């Protein structure tokens, strides 16, 4: 879904961009859209200048890089399974189910808790790094966000901003790479390891949410 959906989004948004797909034949545009959709998830290669993408295409690329590849793979990002668990939790809530179910199986609450923690951790890292780099450089926020998420997901794509960053911003990028590569895995392991049985139950309180 991410591969085909991302390719479709790139193709539709960039088909009239003369700096990217607009100058290519139809077949090549389709291939390059698929290739870019795959590479934003992990590989970091591109035959088009990422810095020439429209703002909408830059946002799509940022979203794909934030998700990243499959769990237990060498790809970065919050991982596909994390997104799937969160999507299933939202779907189950919309249907009024008491538990998250898929393919005749139930996903336990501790797995959902890890998924929420990884998403919150990743979003916090990206938000803080984006604010700091944007404040240092005063560059367009779309370019800053793209390069920061590329660092977080250890993808390697760049709008061209990173090579021109001052030294202080490069340190921020380096920390972002480290936290994105090691931090999410460590956090997931730590949250999973803290699961323990409790022989009592506290009174229920239902705060208003939303």
Image (cartoon, rainbow, N blue to C red):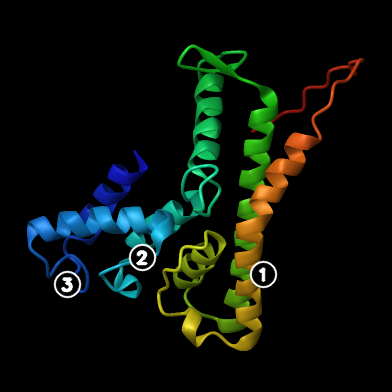
**From what the image shows, is residue 186 above or below residue 143?**
above
* Mark 3 or 1, closer to the camera: 1
Which residue is found at the position 22% from the left and 69% from the top? 20
Q: Nearer the viewer, residue 56 or 151?
A: 151
Question: Mark 3 highlights which residue?
Answer: 18
Q: CA distance from mark 2 to mark 3?
A: 14 Å
Sequence-wise first label, 3 or 1: 3
Which residue is found at the position 71% from the left and 42% from the top? 189
Which structural element holds mark 3?
loop
Q: CA distance from mark 3 to mark 1?
A: 36 Å
Which residue is found at the position 53% from the left and 20% from the top? 92
**From what the image shows, is residue 20 above or below residue 210?**
below
Question: Mark 2 highlights which residue?
Answer: 55
Question: Mark 1 highlights which residue?
Answer: 175
Which residue is found at the position 61% from the left and 59% from the top? 180
| Tag 2 and tag 3, C-beta contact below 8 Å | no
Sequence-wise first label, 2 or 1: 2
Quadrant (top left/top right/bottom left/bottom right) for the N terminus: top left
Quadrant (top left/top right/bottom left/bottom right) for the C terminus: top right
Residue 130 x %, y %: 59, 68
Q: Quadrant of residue 62?
A: bottom left
| Tag 3 and tag 1, C-beta contact below 8 Å | no
Residue 5 x %, y %: 30, 43
Residue 55 x %, y %: 36, 65
**From what the image shows, is residue 126 above or below residue 172?**
above
């Amino acid at each position: 879904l991410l591969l085909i959906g991302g390719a479709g989004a790139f193709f539709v948004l960039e088909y009239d961009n003369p700096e990217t797909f607009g100058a290519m034949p139809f077949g090549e545009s389709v291939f390059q859209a698929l290739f870019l959709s795959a590479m934003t998830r992990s590989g970091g290669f591109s035959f088009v200048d990422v810095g020439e993408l429209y703002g909408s295409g830059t946002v799509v690329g940022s979203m794909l890089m934030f998700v990243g590849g499959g769990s237990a793979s060498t790809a970065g990002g919050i991982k596909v399974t994390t997104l799937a668990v969160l999507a299933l939790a939202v779907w189950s809530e919309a249907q009024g189910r008491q538990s998250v179910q898929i393919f005749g199986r139930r996903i336990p609450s501790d797995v959902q808790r890890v998924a929420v923690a990884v998403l919150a951790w990743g979003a916090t890292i990206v938000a803080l790094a984006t604010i700091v780099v944007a404040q240092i450089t005063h560059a367009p926020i779309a370019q800053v966000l793209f390069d920061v998420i590329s660092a977080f997901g250890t993808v390697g794509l760049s709008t061209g901003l990173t090579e021109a960053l001052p030294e202080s911003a490069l340190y921020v990028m380096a920390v972002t790479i480290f936290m994105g590569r090691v931090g999410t895995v460590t956090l997931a392991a730590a949250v999973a390891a803290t699961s323990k049985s409790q022989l009592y139950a506290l009174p229920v309180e239902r705060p208003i949410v939303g």
